[in-house]
Amino acid sequence: MSSEFPSELRNTLDAGLTALDLDAPTLAPPLLAYLALLIRWNNTYNLTAIRDPREMVGKHLLDSLAMHSHATSGALADLGTGPGLPGIPLALANPALQVTLVESNGKKARFLREAVRVLGLQNARVAESRAEALDEPGAYDWITARALATLRGIIDVGGHLLKPGGSLLAMKGARPDAEIAELPAGWHVEAIHPLNVPGLNAERHLVVVARDQSLS
């Protein structure tokens, strides 16, 4: 699959994975296979507005993987995952992490099932459902959602999925102090981690939000 891409793109991905303390020789081939599949399907199904493969490496693959060390095992639900971001890169990077790709759009869910099949992802499954309708209460150690706008919005639709002691992992740009101030009662910020996404000249933060122990 890597032969489908110019050496410059492959070198950019390898360098980015190395900067994120990931094993580039092991991880780059399945990531490129995923990227090739995404590009082919995107021509028909419009899965992502980003169409330049080089831009996809930074804004999709490496951006998703910048949080890889914060959820290495357990069960994670990726809400409104779209074409599988960040869930598929995280599942590839962390085989001990069980990832549920939650997506209500039928075309995107079909792509996700094909990606899971083609990549041989034993630690990923597709739930074709809206997050709020997913009837798996307390099943997950982690939830995440790139596509949903606010911390409160993610909690409103997916908070029920978390186990006692589970956490929301929210990728944000600048530190979202206004969103933090709007968290619903019974939820608090556990940590805010500045992230460095290789090749992305923009602020990125991982906000970890948990339910108060008294409500768990």
Image (cartoon, rainbow, N blue to C red):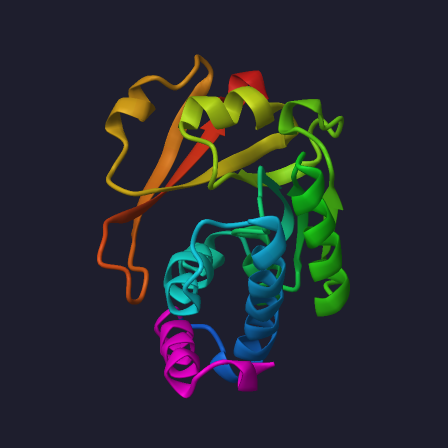
Q: Is residue 96 left or right of residue 57?
A: right
Residues 30 and 143: in front is 30
Q: How many marks?
A: 0
Residue found at the very far front of the displayed protein: 44
Which residue is located at x 58 percent, y 61 percent?
38
Which residue is located at x 50 percent, y 50 percent?
48
Q: Is residue 71 left or right of residue 52?
A: right
Residues 137 and 203: in front is 203
Q: Is residue 166 left or right of residue 52?
A: right
- Which quadrant of the figure has residue 187? top left
Q: Is residue 148 above or below residue 141?
A: above
**Residue 58 location (% of width, % of height):** 37, 63
Q: Is residue 18 above or below residue 90?
A: below
Can you say which quadrant of the picture contains the N terminus?
Answer: bottom right
Task: Point out the stretch of residues depicted in magenta.
Answer: 1-20
**Residue 80 location (% of width, % of height):** 58, 37
Q: Is residue 157 above or below residue 38?
A: above
**Residue 82 location (% of width, % of height):** 57, 44
